[in-house]
Image (cartoon, helix red, strand yellow):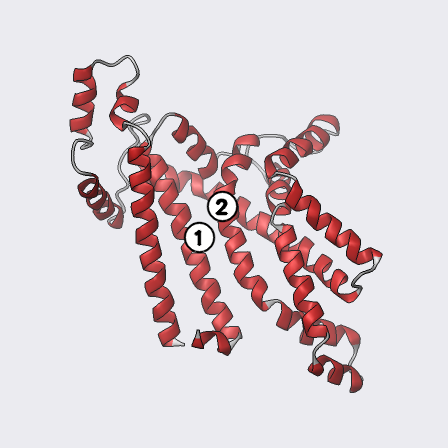
Amino acid sequence: MLIYTLKRLGLALVVMVTVSLISFMLLRVSGDPAISLAGEGASSEEIEFVRVQYGFDRPLLVQYFEWAERALHGDLGNSPYLNQPVAQMLKERMGVTIILGISALSFAMLLSIPLGMLAAIRPNTWIDRIALSISVMGQAMPSFWFGLILIIFFGVHLRWLPISGSDSWRHFVMPTIALGYYATPAIMRLVRSGMIEVLASDHIRTARAKGLRWPKILFKHTLRNAIIPVVAVAAVQLGFMLGGSIVIESIFALNGLGNLAWVSISRSDLPVVQAIVLFLSTTYIILTFLADLLNAFLDPRIRSI
């Protein structure tokens, strides 16, 4: 287990460095940051002054290593537009994004696992078809479109829920459903296929022949084995949700990292965008690393891979 952990940790560090390097280069070559900061009506002297002041005149690799060294010490620079430390801005916003991501994943798990179980117990029946229909709807509907439908129905017509802000738990209900429903199909189908495979195995037939109660067979012997691959998928889905919160937070005016990223991209605030990309990619890599360790703990065969 120790060797497996070290291998996965080394791979995670390599991926993290690669992602930070690629994202840094792409943001720098997508446009001249000096022109964006100086403004469209700035003179060539003003643009050159900004380029020298912020170090954009130096080679990209030199800029990257300087930025990476500061980032390792917790210094993510300052926002040139708001003149605030980027680390402080992320600290103030990340709570909303984390709450939204975890609540959306919880909603997806609570909906998809029972649906997957019902579909597996009654395959090729109307119950299975309804569960698959719900799954297809989740994949077919873009989360931003579903979010707008929720706003019109529950926020405008029924007035049950607030349509913007993040002051109370009620503000998170519609964003959670809009973001979590998109992740439901992948988890539901995985649970369904896993349980069908386990239910057809010899040890389940043996358990039924011994007269074990059906709920015990279903939850202890079947779901426990079928849920192992769901762990890895759930971690990946949480990473997608944190990244995908950019659109949902903008629609529901949640004051999180997604909304901050959207505003920062529109005004080419590179230090903030770079820091958000680093935070989201690091979170995604850490979640994948933890999911690999948990899977290896639950299934020893994985450690030999």
Q: Is residue 126 left or right of residue 198?
A: right
Q: Secondary structure at mark 2?
A: helix
* Residue, far right: 126
What amino acid is labelled 2 in the image? Leu
> What residue is disc 2 on?
242
Q: Residues within 10 Å of mark 1 (few under 14, many from 20)?
A: many
x%, y% of residue 183? Answer: 60, 49
Residue at the image point whose x is 27% and y is 22% from the top: 35
Residue at the image point whose x is 68% and y is 30% from the top: 155
Q: Quadrant of residue 169?
A: top right
Q: How many discs appear?
A: 2
Q: Is residue 221 left or right of residue 167?
A: right
x%, y% of residue 226? Answer: 64, 69
Is any part of residue 85 visible from this angle?
A: no
Q: Quadrant of residue 43?
A: top left
> What residue is disc 1 on?
284
